[in-house]
Image (cartoon, grey):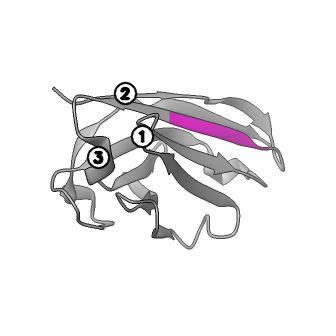
Amino acid sequence: QVQLVESGGGLVQAGGSLRLSCAASGLTFSRYSMAWFRLAPGKGREFVGAVAWSGSNTTYADSVKGRFTISRDNAKNTVYLQMNSLKPEDTAVYYCAADRMTLRFTTFLYDYASWGQGTQVTVSA
């Protein structure tokens, strides 16, 4: 059974930084692309960024490009989201997710089958 556990959320002032972590178990981590999504009040789940199984490819939503960096450590079965220059509109619950297929790089919500419980990020103005 796949388990994804996020950590690192919290309250930060605008312009500040946070680093989210997602520890994975129950899968051969190095064979799966991983992604971060977020859910803000009144909005649908939004793609934030993804990293390919090898870590060689990354992609980001336009809204976070240049401010957020996604990375992974396959030896630790962990994916990270470094968030800099945070804005109030980044306030959301952030979820990490694992692709349902191996060795594929995708940004589509429904390609991701396993989800963490989410971690709250709140950015004050």
Q: How many marks?
A: 3
Q: Decide: marks 3, 1 in contact (CB < 8 A)?
A: no
Q: Find the magenta span and give its range.
A: 17-21
Question: Local crowd at mark 1 within 10 Å, few (<14), some, or many (≥20)?
Answer: many
- Is residue 36 magenta-colored? no
Query: Reading the chain from its start, which is encountered first: label 1 or label 2?
Result: 1
Q: Which mark is residue 109?
A: none
Q: Residue at x 71, y 48 (%)?
A: 88
- Mark yes or no: residue 29 visible: yes
Residue with the mark numbered 3: 98
Q: Secondary structure at mark 3?
A: strand
Q: Main secondary structure of the magenta part?
A: strand
Residue with the mark numbered 1: 95
Q: Decide: marks 1, 2 in contact (CB < 8 A)?
A: yes
Quadrant hosting residue 106:
bottom left
Task: Say left or right for 24 vs 63.
Answer: left
Marks 3 and 1, how far apart at CA = 10 Å
- From this view, report whether residue 90 is shown above or below residue 76: below
Residue type, numbered disc 1: Tyr
Q: Residue at x 49, y 48 (%)?
A: 72
Instruction: Using the image as rendered, state which of residue 96 and residue 93 is in the foreground.
Output: 96
Marks 3 and 2, how far apart at CA = 13 Å
Residue with the mark numbered 2: 117
Residue type, numbered disc 3: Ala
